[in-house]
Amino acid sequence: MNYFNQSLASLHEALATGAFTSEQLMQQSLDNIKTTDKTIKAFLRMNDKALEQAKAIDEKGIADDQPLAGIPIAIKDNILTKGLLTTAASKILNNFVPIFNATVIEKLQQAGMIVIGKTNLDEFAMGSSTETSAYQMTHNAWNYDKVPGGSSGGSAAAVASGQVIAALGSDTGGSIRQPSAFNGVVGFKPTYGRISRWGLITFSSSLDEIGVITRSVLDNAKIMNVLAGQDEKDPTTVVNDTDFTQNLDGDISGMKIALPCEFMGEGVDPQVRETIMAAADTFRSLGATVEEVGLPYSKYAVPTYYIVASSEASSNLQRYDGIRYGFRAPDAKTLEDVYVKSRTEGFGEEVKRRIMLGTFSLSAGYYDAYFKKAAQVRALITKDFMDVFKDYDLIMAPTTPTPAFNIGEKVTDPVTMYMNDVLTISANLAGVPAASIPAGFNDEGLPIGMQLVGKHFDENTVYRAGYAFEQATDFHNQVPTVGGEA
């Protein structure tokens, strides 16, 4: 079975009425993944206890107030899963089996969802194409010659190809939204602090966020309801008293939407620009106002992000020393050998590149010129957003400058690859919620994503606008012809 024609609501109804059991659903899902993943390569490993866990759900029974119980979900392999190998797609963690679950996994399990497997990513979530994984190359669900995006490429491809109905990803600079755009699915990055990061393998502590990838806005909001909330293990989290499925009625009349001119200029593919302009017209037809605005400091977002993120990565990745856990170079003879050889052999080229950039930015004599200056510019980028939100409810823009590019096209040119995040990283720097919504296709049939950005802790408005757009269009219902039978 694939999930192209399913929703969380339809699956819950089928499970609750006995049309099929959770065990049967899990078995059919595993069978489909076994067949389709030979080409997609979205999964790094499956949960060998998934069927057992599904059977336990069946024996317990599924109540009407358990809308997610018995339903499989895929998890990006940088989110800790107790007893299940978690590598962050890095050789340095090739033997790391966590002894506890991330908070989001605990919450999913309390809701009755079952982890079906762990999905591929760019190593330590550092990349925009899933080509830096130490284990395999994931393919775009719509065209196997194209990248799936990154770093949550495995999660997005798994949802887009009908392997699962939902997946968790992480987003540090666009790593949920960009692959969601490339694969024609809904990807949501919440406000920083909305979802606990406890148990997420850290890349950049002030930017990392966990979010949800689904085929529809409503399904995304339902899972967000389960994940959001305060966690004593993550002091950045806040209490959640919001139902994200509220006001999803298609009515956005009177909503004021800003369209930044900086996000529609040089470097944006003409067909992407045309798609976003058409989306703006759709919003206008629904009674919203769409007006052009400026985000002048957004042009500094890429260098600001890569200094901040790489500096934090340099600090966070010091723990991988070949001593406490993870890979240790077998021929190391001294303590210095253990450190140097383990990291040299365990980390991939992109991870080492960012560690060196971050270490340089934090070093004596350069801290003020680089990291401190980047932190100051980050504050100006945040102020840009706050100024726009004084007059507008929402910001819309392309998610990516182009549709999915060819495998191997940019991986050897780091600067070109980094520019692929130019439209997404500002939201991470500002800590505001942002989603990618399917908005159309180019002449090659590749999906194009529209980014919706909201005010701090106003995910509801993003969901509301995204849902209204879905109801007025049919892009989210399109399925890849190469990804499996619809």
Image (tube, rainbow, N blue to C red):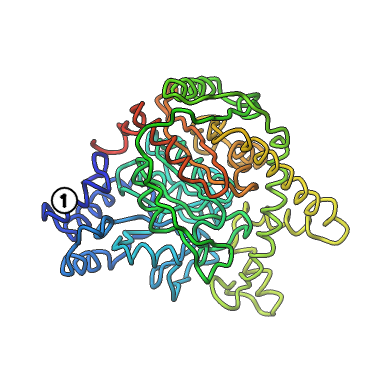
Judge by depth and name the residue closer to the eye, 54 or 37.
54
Is 79 placed above or below 392 here? below
Please, which residue is most extreme toward the right here? Answer: 365
Q: Position of residue 397 (x, y in %)?
A: 55, 31
- Residue name at image x 36 percent, y 26 percent: 473
Q: Position of residue 453 (x, y in %)?
A: 54, 39
- Residue 130 visible here: no
Q: Viewed as shown, does residue 315 lie left or right of 276?
A: right
Judge by depth and name the residue closer to the eye, 241 or 124.
241
Is 103 placed above or below 187 here? below
**Could you tell me how many numbered marks the image carries?**
1
Q: Residues within 10 Å of mark 1 (few under 14, many from 20)?
A: some
- Residue 94 visible here: yes
Q: Position of residue 134 (x, y in %)?
A: 51, 56
Q: Viewed as shown, does residue 158 lie left or right of 267?
A: left
- Residue name at image x 63 percent, y 71 percent: 319
The picture quadrant where one finds residue 330 is: bottom right
Amino acid carrying mark 1 in the image: Ala
Q: Position of residue 288 (x, y in %)?
A: 48, 26
Which residue is the site of mark 1?
14
- Residue name at image x 30 percent, y 47 percent: 163
Is 425 placed above or below 71 here? above
Please, which residue is most extreme toward the front here? Answer: 254
Q: Viewed as shown, does residue 474 lie left or right of 25?
A: right
- Residue name at image x 30 percent, y 60 percent: 113
Q: Viewed as shown, does residue 263 lie left or right of 475?
A: right
Quadrant placement of the C terminus:
top left
**Mark 1 element type:** helix
